[in-house]
Amino acid sequence: MSGQVQGVDGGKVFAAVDIGASSGRVILGRVAAGGTATEAAVQLEVVHRFPNGVVEIDGGLRWNFDALFAEVLDGLRAAATVAAAQDEKVASIGIDTWAVDYGLVDAGGKLTAQPFSYRDDRSRAAVEPVHRKLDPARLYGTTGLQFLQFNTIYQLATEPDLEGLQALLIPDLIAFLLTGQRRTEATNASTTGLFDAVAGEWATEFLTALGLRKDLFPPLIQPGESFGTLLPEIASQVGLPQDTTVVAVGSHDTASAVAAVPAQEEDFAYISSGTWSLVGLELKHPVLTEASREANFTNERGVDGTIRYLRNMGGLWLLSECQRTWAAEGFQPELPALLEAAAALPPGGPQINPDDPYFIAPDNMPDRIRAAVRRTGEVLPNDPAAITRCIMDSLATGYARTIRDAERLADRSVDVVHVVGGGSQNRLLCQLTADVTGKKVIAGPVEATALGNVLVQARAAGAVSGGLTELRSLVVRSHQLQTFTPELSRL
């Protein structure tokens, strides 16, 4: 496709609803006017922030979706206000969130209960019954999906009665409440365990094998396609015109983040570093080999039909949970000081497996990390700096191992690792990743997910043109990136 990038006309801006497991934002994206690809740039303005997190409701860990949707409306109202003050028009809205979780709605469109969180343990007991009906090798050979006990396929197997109900993944549920249209965006559909990685369609034979209706999920929609326009009552509530379009983006937040990886290389590794770490390569075709299954790699859809070949690893959830525990105990160190103290410690300290399910649920994380170290025969002091260094070393080692495995399994070789998301600001983690991988690490942008969301909307509106290469060139020009090179003396 052409490398020509047009500037936004008519003062159009794009609203990105970007919700993670611990917080959410509504962001306005603008593409600065420029006649050529070397002149345009994309800018973001956060207009609303809000907390998110699991809560215990009806004996399970769930999302307070009603409160979450109210925050989305507040954010869109703020977006309308800010845009109007600058004589701009919100051209469209795009929504991205985490994957796998869903809400159940009845024929009238009513949400039957607050959606379960993947951190709830309910799906563990469903794994074996599902595998009795569908052999894991057969599942992987079709879906290419990494085994995680909370994948949608296992969550659905715990539902007592789905008669007359439809499952909407979280971003699609938000889009439905905004537009009245039921669709399932493809990048998120690919995380369910019920999606054919080659055909790009629902694996309806798996739904049938599990006794699920073929229309349990709505029809698929691709990034760049339109859900529809705002319902009249929603438009009135938020102060936006009724013809405001809700555009499907890479609604799995990692799909949006990878779309905005500032890669100039054809082959590169990426780490989307946040609550979780998504570590892998971008491919044109899935890798569905038995070796890939045994290595627990996943093949998920990306923007423009790409494949996100990755492993879902533990992430900075470990550190944020430690900070939460320390704060409750009266110790609230600033993160930069904590990381500086951790960096001053000598290398070669104890490590944990950050992917261990032992760390998924919220609890006293420092105690759990120290207990995990004890099981290896080592001792970790009850010291925040030492625990933080253990987390950083463990994540970097896991990243290096995952990238090596991805290169081997996909028959690719990469020299550059791009780190995007919140972890790109963590200098210690980025430097350790360069050291352990032996590869150059390029860190940034922090807001890759929102950038990917906005750029897909802008392209759908005709404000920019081109493929992922052109979209990524916009990111490179718009953001300062930081490079880390391996320092083998630190190992």
Image: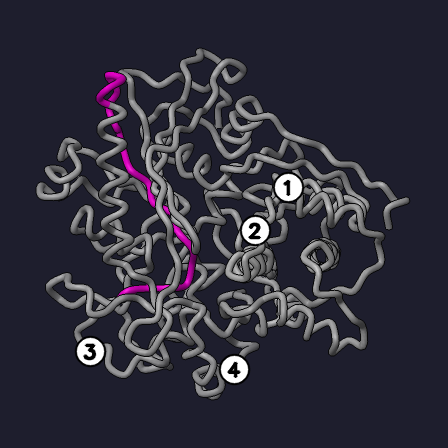
Q: Quadrant of residue 54?
A: bottom left
Q: Are marks 2 and 1 in contact (CB under 8 Å)?
A: no
Query: Which amino acid lies under the numbered mark 2 shown in the image of this protein?
Result: Gln
Q: Who comes first in sequence, dot 3 or dot 4?
A: 4
Q: Which residue is mark 4?
A: 135
Q: Which mark, by number, is residue 332?
A: 2
Q: Which residue is mark 3?
A: 163
Q: Which stretch is magenta?
A: 84-103
Q: Which residue is mark 1?
A: 336
| SS for callout 4 | loop
The type of colouring in the image is: one colour
In three-dimensional space, the C-alpha distance between marks 2 and 4, rounded to whole angstroms, equals: 48 Å
Q: Nearer the viewer, residue 301 or 331?
A: 331
Query: Which amino acid lies under the numbered mark 1 shown in the image of this protein?
Result: Pro
Q: Residue at x 19, y 64 (%)?
A: 111
Q: Residues within 10 Å of mark 3 (few under 14, many from 20)?
A: few
In three-dimensional space, the C-alpha distance between marks 3 and 2, rounded to whole angstroms, equals: 49 Å
Image spot of residue 365 (x, y percent): 58, 66
Image spot of residue 14 (x, y percent): 32, 30
